[in-house]
Image (cartoon, grey):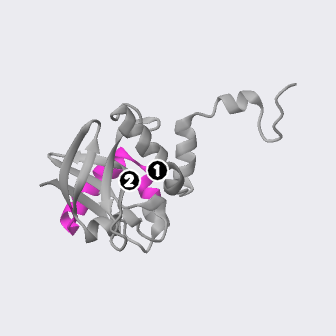
Amino acid sequence: MGYSCPLASPDDLRQISMPSLTDFASKRGWYLGKRSTPIHVWIYRRSGGRIGAHYPGRRECRIALVDHRGAKSNVVRTSPLIYLAQGGDIVVVASKAGHPTNPAWFHNLMANPNTTVQIGREVREIRARLAGDGERERLWPKLTQMFPAYEIYRRNASPRRLPVVILEPR
C-alpha cells in the first residue's frame, strides 16, 4: 500500500528537516518545553551532552541544563536553555518563545539564585542574577546574532521585556 497525505507528497516531506521544523515553531512562538523538556534532559545527561547540546540545525546555539528550585514548591527541576558564553559567565534569555509571561525557571532562579548548570559533562555551581540595563544592551545584539528568533520572541512578547539572566560562577 502506498503513502497518502492530502497536504504533501512524500518528496515534499523528505525535504522537511529538523532545522526547518524548529525554525517554523520558533517563528510561531510554539513553546514545547513542558512536553519535550524531560526527554531532552534525560538524553543530554545520559549522553554527557553529546546529544542535545546544540539547537537543531544551529551549531552556534549551545544548550546547557540549568537546575532551579521551585520558588513555592521547593522542588528541583532542570531546564535545557540556549546560552551564550561570556568569559566565565553564562547568559540565558527568559523568552518562553515570546509568550506574554516569563517562564517558571526564571521566577525560580530569581527566588533561589544559587544552583548548578551542566554543560556537556561538566557541572558548575553558579549564582543567577538579572542583567542590568547596560549589560542587557551590550549582550542583546550578541544573543540575537546567535539565535535570531529572539527578535521574533521580543516582538511577540511585547510589552513584556524578555529578561536576560547572567549565571556567574560561585
Q: Which residue is mark 1?
A: 37
Q: Nearer the viewer, residue 42 or 53?
A: 42
Q: Is residue 141 magenta?
A: yes
Q: CA distance from mark 1 to mark 2?
A: 7 Å
Question: If you read the primary sequence from the N terminus, does the residue marked by circle 1 or circle 2 appear first?
Answer: 1
For the magenta stretch, what is the residue range?
128-152
The answer to which of 69 and 82 lies nearer the viewer is: 69
- Three-letter amino acid code of the residue under disc 2: Ser
> Is disc 1 surrounded by few (<14), some (14 to 19) or many (20+) residues within 10 Å?
some
Q: Which residue is mark 2?
A: 79
Q: Residue at x 27, y 41 (%)?
A: 119
Tag 2, which secondary structure? strand
Whether residue 144 appears in magenta in the rendering, the answer is yes
Left or right: residue 155 versus residue 128 is: right
Q: Which mark is residue 23?
A: none
Front in this rendered view, residue 105 or 164: 105
From the top left corner, tell me how far across and down residue 91 is, in percent: 26, 53
